[in-house]
Image (cartoon, rainbow, N blue to C red):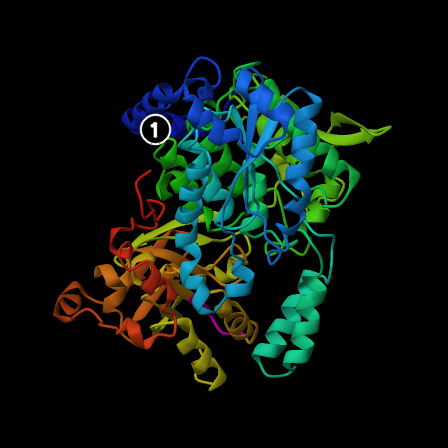
Amino acid sequence: MTDSKIAAITDRIIEKSRATREAYLDKIERGRSNGPARKRLSCGNLAHGFAACGSSDKQALAEGDAPNLGIVSAYNEMLSAHEPYVSYPDLIKKAAHEVGMTAQFAGGVPAMCDGVTQGREGMDLSLFSRDVIAMSTAIALSHDMFDGALCLGICDKIVPGLTIGALSFGQLPVIFVPAGPMPPGLPNAEKVRVRQLFAEGKVGRKELLEAESASYHSAGTCTFYGTANSNQMLMEIMGLHLPGSSFVNPGTELRNVLTDAAVKQLAAITTHGNYTPMAAVVDEKSVVNGMVGLLATGGSTNHAIHLMAMARAAGVIVDWQDLSDLSDAVPLMCRIYPNGLADINRFQAVGGMGYLMRELRDAGILHDDVKTVMGEGGLDPYTKEPFLDDGKLVWQDAPKESLDDGVLRPAKSAFSATGGMKLLTGNLGRCVIKVSAVKPEHRTVKAPAVVFQDQDGLQKAFKAGELDKDFVAVVRFQGPKACGMPELHKLTPPLGVLQDRGYKVALVTDGRMSGASGKIPAAIHLTPEALDKGPIGLVRDGDIVEVDAETGVLQLHVSDEELKTREHSEFDLSDSHEVMGRELFAPLRQTVGSAEEGATVFRW
């Protein structure tokens, strides 16, 4: 039975989404057809569609009965998480042929690595790349050639973009196929220690690069619990992955067998089988399940933006109030870096998604009356995990007990009775804060503001020794309309050093702080942003700013009368080195929605 608080929030979401959800489903129904859509294609259309296929595939496609699967991939060699996808199209086509189907590579989508672009001009493109990926996905699926789709993507903006684009063709069954995390490398605590030593000038670039290379050391997803691994959790808990498939390492036999199984499961849910379109999987209850998973695991703050945009693509309206209210009802069950010291491989080993989802379901915190890519069985298949038995795939019940309660705990004895994110409101606007990695004694800071127009300004002040004091860093003109809302991850080491020195420090920004948001109280995604004349543009050095994650308050302690006399700060954005996003997306930046709306350029 669903917990009463979870049920009430879900009912609220259903009610406010009634009109948009109905409009979405009507659109999807118009896109449906009885049997393969390619039967409606002219001979010339169809001939173009299979011109490059082998003779047997041409015959199957011409006859129009066997399912044809579209592959949309974010493969590239520069992004370690996506490099394993190089071999997936051949594996998928082989598996499809084994069950009398065909498969075609429908299209590739861009996939940038935020780890490479942190603090660089390319980071201006990061958030907007999600909408480019969504458009690319929709283009790939627009040819009326496919009965289902397999989406190959893992990291940051890529999974949200694939999801948004695929939902435009929600009449198709869609399965997301992961590639898995790299094996463990340098322990996260040691990586952080070296980063902070570098920030203080106590070690050089050689030592830093050695530490980073030992941490990010092979093909596969980075092992910390940032946006990439939060994406994988999200796809599984929303029923778009095969059960237990999120965190199996690349290059293993089990990984390949799971990819094969995903193809065959997709065949089972096309119109030729137990038809389960993506539009039926992604609904109000599955979106709530996604938010619950995000909170229970201490997942990425980026999903305070992405999940809202993904939901809106399916006609579901959710906002930060929904997320914050759910956080009050969802226990924090995981300690995975940056919320702890363990990596994602350890989480998988001690119980993983099967244990987590069974605990949440049995506690009434997850909706069980949902459709998944496994069909009508609710979440029961997701309480199991995959194994190989003489080379064949079998699912067994997930462990009954966590094998390490320092990493994963049952709902009834969680690390915290509440989840990892909260909504902050006050006279500066609305924003979110991730508290799962912030110790209780650091969750309330009331101190003078030090105002910066970009993250480089804070770096310079730190290196000059100007920040050895209690303060709230106010970093503005970092919103989606200003410069594409870059992640400000470079701020974490210096602020962490200052906190370790005993100072009370916090961050307030209209930018993002990434899925690696850590031990510093960071009030992020502030809306309205400075470029939209948000109150953050009125803050001056020395103003007292209060950040209180316990009570949900973000307050500038300046009188209303004084604020009325101030003019908004003007900042010449051309002075910043971060210009790439402003140049490439100049026609679109001023149409972007607020962070709370998902910061989408287009209205899906």
Which image quarter: residue 204? bottom right
Q: Is residue 365 visible?
A: no
Query: Above or below — where is 279 with respect to 481?
Result: above
Residue situated furthest bottom in the rendering = 464
**Where residue 11 sits in the image (x, y, percent)?**
37, 25
Q: Place residue 398 in its image quadrant.
A: top right
Which residue has dot 1 on it? 12
Residue at 51%, 23% (x, y): give it.
Answer: 147
User: Range of the magenta residues?
Assistant: 502-506
Between 365 and 153, the one nearer to me in the picture: 153
Q: Which part of the image, by quadrant, shows the C terminus?
A: top left
Image quadrant where residue 549 sits = bottom left
Rendered location of residue 363, percent (x, y): 58, 28
Q: Is residue 121 magenta?
A: no
The residue positioned 40% from the left and 28% from the top of the image is 10
Instruction: Give the camera-side residue of 354 and 57.
Output: 57
Q: Is residue 393 left or right of residue 322?
A: right
The image position of residue 359, as x and y in percent, is 63, 31
Residue in the image at 49% along x and 51% along y: 110
